[in-house]
Amino acid sequence: MANQLNAPLTIGPQADLGQAAGLAFSSTLIDFLSAERRHNMAMSVPDDLPGRTAAPTTIPVQVGSPLSVFALGTYAALDRTTQNRAAGSIGNTYGADFGGVTAGLMYQATPNLVLGAAFNYLSTSVDLRGTTNARIDLDSFQGAGFASLSFPNFFADAAFTYGGNDYRVDRPGVLNDRLSAAPGGDTFTASARVGYLFEFGTFKAGPVGEVAYANVHVNAYRESGDPLLTLGVRSQNLEGLTAGGGVQIRTALPAFGGLLSPFLNLTAQHDFLDGVRTVGSFQTYAPALLIRTQAGRVGDGVYGRVAGGFDVDLGNALSGVVAGSTSFARSGGDDHVVSAGLRYRF
């Protein structure tokens, strides 16, 4: 009886994990573009002529090939805690660690505009301890297109990602039997960051705003195993929309015979679509009796996010990049992502 009552608790985390994988990819790209800001603008030379009295301006000049490639190792973590409300508890308590790789191509379309495409693979295995004692494995394969507009003071970055998710759900039955399923799904995200920085000596600082949207779909499926215990689950859809604003600080320092260019963002954010949803399931021997399970996270407050990173010249058109972000004081648990790798300019 306990097995049947707790079985629906394995459903909600599936869409949450798909959303986390998509947002980790888009966050990796947006933070990477912020870390590489100075490399995404062409060099400038003065356009004043001899004998002119007007103050000189600058003309961007493209040096070398407009193509570059990058590869990043990516780690992401997701913490979820059950939220208690007057009407009852929502969600599960669990943690997920993602590992994978991000790689892409960048093209300097104009002196101030970079266009690019990227591929990402992330995987995780989550043990749902407690009453379910279930396990969810996820492999996520995603592609993206992105753009970065960079001027000395103004910048705007945007990334769009889409990919497929392969889940494997496994939970115990009775007498050492196992119940399992392998549903598929997909994730789409759109994210952007924009800001204007004022100069304060060797530092730049100013307001920054960002937004992230995610749409996740998990296909309907039926478990295999003991027919008296297996579940059928209807398709799931999860939408999320987060926006916020704050401040960015950045500078450039000499290091290793080149430049080290760090940045730091501190923003306040709010989830305008909190993701609370009702998922339908049924015992496969009684498909007409629908079980409705409430899942998701109530986004009823403002929380913080810190993002930062740096790039450093390594010589021979090669640069190293480290970037990441983490939320804090977020109801229902926080998320974290960090990436590190190399960029090579031809």
Image (cartoon, grey):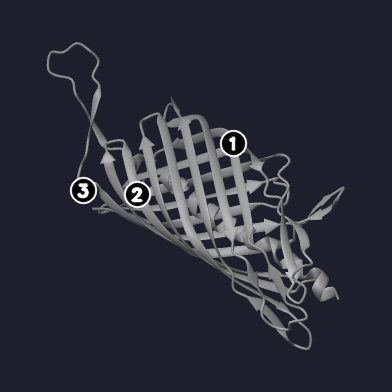
In this rendering, which labeled residue sits more in front, label 1 or label 3? 1
**Residue underneath mark 2:** 116
Residue 72 visible to the viewer = no
State which tag comes first along the sequence, 1 or 3: 3
* Vertical side of 37 occupied by 126: above or below: below
**Residue underneath mark 1:** 244
How far apart are the two marked residues, 3 and 2, measured between alpha carbons? 15 Å
Residue 326 visible to the viewer = yes
State which tag comes first along the sequence, 2 or 1: 2
Q: Residue furthest top?
A: 53
Secondary structure beneath disc 1? Answer: strand
Give the x, y percent position of residue 192.
48, 40
Give the x, y percent position of residue 261.
41, 42
Residue at figure coordinates x 25%, y 36% from the top left:
43
State which tag comes first along the sequence, 3 or 2: 3
Secondary structure beneath disc 2? Answer: strand
The three-letter amino acid code for the residue at tag 2 is Gly
How far apart are the two marked residues, 2 and 1, measured between alpha carbons? 25 Å
